[in-house]
Every structure is written in C-alpha cells, then in structure tokens.
Amino acid sequence: MSNPFKLFSQPPTPAKTPPIREEPEKIKKWREAQKQRLEEKDAEEEKKKEEMRKAAKKELEEWYRHHEELIAKTKAANRNAEKQFVAEVDDIEPGTEWERIAKLCDFNPKVGRTNKDVSRMRSIILQLKQTPLKKD
C-alpha cells in the first residue's frame, strides 16, 4: 500500500530564486541624493515647527497678559461703580424718590412700530419729579 500523504511528508524543495542584480551606479547616486534631500527637508521642517511653537507661545503669553489687564480694569471699574452706588444710596433724602426714578428713565422718545407708546408714563414721571405727592 502506498502512502497517500507521501507528498506532504517530504520536505519542500527550495524554489530557485533569480540572482540578485546589483543596482546601477546612477540609481545608487539618485537614492543617496534623495535621502540627503529628505533629511534636509525634515531638518528645515523641524526648524520651522520650532519657530512656530515659539511664536505661538509668545502670542499666547501676550493674550493672557492682555486678558489679565482687561480683568483688572473691569474689576476697578466695578469697584468704582459700587462705591458710587453706595454713596448715592447713603445720600437718600426723603422726598427725592421721584428724582431718583427720573434718573433711571430714558426720556428720549424712540420711534418704531414694535415699541409701545410710553410717552404718557414719561410725562407722569416728570410731573411727579417736579411736584412730588404729599404724604398726609
């Protein structure tokens, strides 16, 4: 009886590979020149990346400095406004309520279809400012 798996049990025979050809000199020179160019481009790219990082860092620091200045100015303005408000509240005299209300109102008429007519309210506030109500 012959073994049907005989073909599979034998070691494979190596396939013949064609002999390796030496690259022509021109191709070797081109590869070297190409490699050199790529290395130079990579170095230049890294240099530009570093310059961009430095510029971005400087710009970010400038933005933060400007932002801090803006916050400081806003805080100072808010403190001054609060001091002024507290001073005005402390100076309240009886009978000046309508004058304070009139300060808060905008008496310039605004013309437009979407706005309601508030001229009567304006005139009442001005009248009360000039002759306040008397308490009995």
Image (cartoon, rainbow, N blue to C red):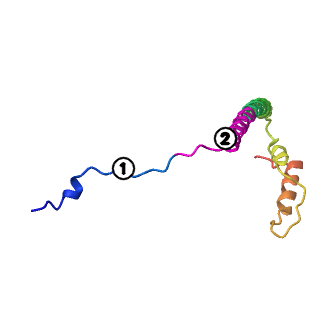
The location of residue 39, given as percent across then percent down, is: 69, 35
Against 128, residue 77 (above or below) is above
Question: In the rendered structure, which segment of residues is drawn in magenta?
Answer: 20-49
The location of residue 10, given as percent across then percent down, is: 24, 52
**Residue 70 versus residue 23: which sits nearer the camera?**
23
Determine which residue is flagged by label 1: 14
Q: Residue at x 79, y 43 (%)?
A: 97
Alpha carbon of mark 1 to alpha carbon of mark 2: how far? 31 Å
In the image, is residue 16 part of the stretch drawn in magenta? no
Q: Residue at x 83, y 66 (%)?
A: 117
**Residue 15 versus residue 130: which sits nearer the camera?**
15
Screen quadrant of the N terminus: bottom left
Residue 133 visible (yes or no):
yes
The image quadrant that residue 37 belongs to is top right
Determine which residue is flagged by label 2: 28
The image quadrant that residue 78 belongs to is top right
The location of residue 48, given as percent across then percent down, is: 75, 35
Q: Amino acid at mark 2?
A: Lys
Against 130, residue 41 (above or below) is above
